Image: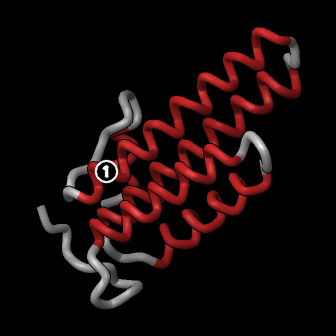
Amino acid sequence: MNNGESTLIKGFGANLFAAVLFFAAGVISFLCGFTGWLGFIMLVIAALLFFIEGNSFVRRACFTIMLLCVLTLVSWLLFRVILPWGFFKVINWIIDAAVTLFLLFSGLCALNGKSVNIPYLANLIDSVCK
């Protein structure tokens, strides 16, 4: 499926642009265990591209990345700052690993022109990205 071209970078397909964003967010999500400030940088990049980019497929990818960054931040605050005991750190690690795997899977699907819906949030993402 072809989702057109990016309006930000001419000649750059929206599928490839969204896949690059998902892969970058996945790598940054993996590295956030070592350097947490990278997640904030990805959140800022996704927010800027959400407002600049006109292609709805890329905007959908940016909004999904922003939601997952917020989920990771809330998980970190809850399980690392408020409840910093052993079992809660494991829960935070599981959430971070699930987010990273979802981002990498979404990048592979974006290369094929398909979008992956997050359960319970698909309607919100569709309404914001139209």
Residue of label 1 = 108
**Residue occupying image coordinates x 62% and y 46%:** 29
Label 1 residue SS: helix
Relative to residue 102, is residue 95 depicted above or below? above
> Quarter of the image containing the C terminus?
bottom left
Q: Position of residue 33 (x, y in %)?
A: 74, 40
Depicted 91 relative to depicted 48: above or below: above
Q: Quadrant of residue 82?
A: top right
Q: Quadrant of residue 122?
A: top left
Q: What residue is shown at x 21% (from left), y 52% (from top)?
A: 114
- The relative height of residue 11 versus residue 73 in the rendered view (above or below) is below
Question: Which residue is the extreme one toward the bottom?
Answer: 10
Question: Residue flagged by tag 1: what amino acid is it?
Answer: Leu
Instruction: Decide if residue 7 is on the left or right side of residue 71.
Output: left
Display coloring: secondary structure
- Who is closer to the viewer here, 40 or 89? 89
- Which residue reaches farthest left? 1
Q: Is residue 88 left or right of residue 8?
A: right
Q: Is residue 88 above or below residue 19?
A: above
Count of labels in the image: 1
Give the crowd class for mark 1: few <14, some 14-19, many >=20 residues within 10 Å. Answer: many
Q: Nearer the viewer, residue 105 or 39?
A: 105
Q: Position of residue 109 (x, y in %)?
A: 27, 49
| Image quarter hosting the N terminus | bottom left
x then y, percent, for residue 23: 46, 56
Identify the residue at horizontal 27%, vertical 76% (top origin). Answer: 13
Q: Is 52 on the left or on the right of 44, as rendered?
A: left
Q: What residue is rendered at 80% in x and 31% in y?
A: 77
Residue extending farthest to the top is 87
Residue 66: give x, y in percent of width and height: 55, 52
